[in-house]
C-alpha cells in the first residue's frame, strides 16, 4: 500500500502526470520504431536497396 500512496503523491500534480504520459509515449514510439525497423530489415535482408546498391552503383 505504501507504493500506491507514493505514486498518488507524485502524480497528484497534473503537470507531473501529463509530463510522464508524454515522455512515456515518446519513449514507446522510439522503441517501437527501432524494433519494427530491425524486424523489417531482418525479414527483407538481401532485397533492399541498401543490400543491392553495390550491383548498380557506378563509380564516377
Image (spheres, helix red, strand yellow):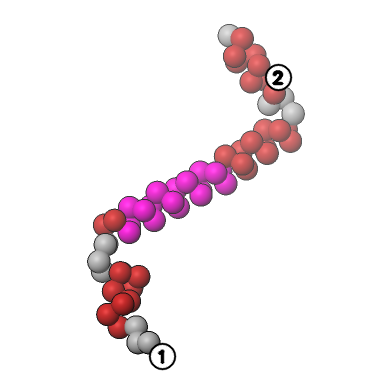
Q: Position of residue 27 (x, y in %)?
A: 55, 44
Furthest toward the bottom, the residue is 60
Q: Residues within 10 Å of mark 2 (few under 14, many from 20)?
A: few
- Nearer to the camera, 24 or 46: 46
Q: Position of residue 17 (x, y in %)?
A: 67, 33
- Nearer to the camera, 33 or 25: 33
Quarter in which the N terminus is drawn: top right
Q: Position of residue 40 (x, y in %)?
A: 33, 57
Is the magenta region chiefly helix, strand or loop?
helix
Residue 1 located left or right of residue 57 = right
Residue under the point 59% across and 14% down: 3
- Nearer to the camera, 34 or 19: 34
The residue tagged 1 is 60
| Nearer mark to the viewer, of 2 and 1 | 1
Residue under the point 32% across and 59% down: 41
Q: Residues within 10 Å of mark 1 (few under 14, many from 20)?
A: few
Q: Is residue 19 above or below residue 44?
A: above
Element marked by disc 1 = loop
Furthest toward the top, the residue is 1
- Residue 6 image-quadrant placement: top right
- Residue 21 image-quadrant placement: top right
Q: Position of residue 30 (x, y in %)?
A: 51, 49
State which tag comes first along the sequence, 2 or 1.
Answer: 2
What segment carries the magenta color? Answer: 25-41
Residue 24 located left or right of residue 53 = right
Q: Is residue 23 above or below residue 11?
A: below
The residue tagged 2 is 9
Amino acid at each position: 500500500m505504501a507504493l500506491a500512496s507514493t505514486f498518488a503523491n507524485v502524480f497528484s500534480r497534473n503537470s507531473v502526470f501529463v509530463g510522464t504520459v508524454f515522455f512515456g509515449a515518446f519513449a514507446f514510439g522510439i522503441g517501437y520504431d527501432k524494433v519494427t525497423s530491425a524486424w523489417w530489415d531482418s525479414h527483407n535482408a538481401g532485397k533492399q536497396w541498401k543490400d543491392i546498391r553495390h550491383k548498380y552503383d557506378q563509380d564516377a
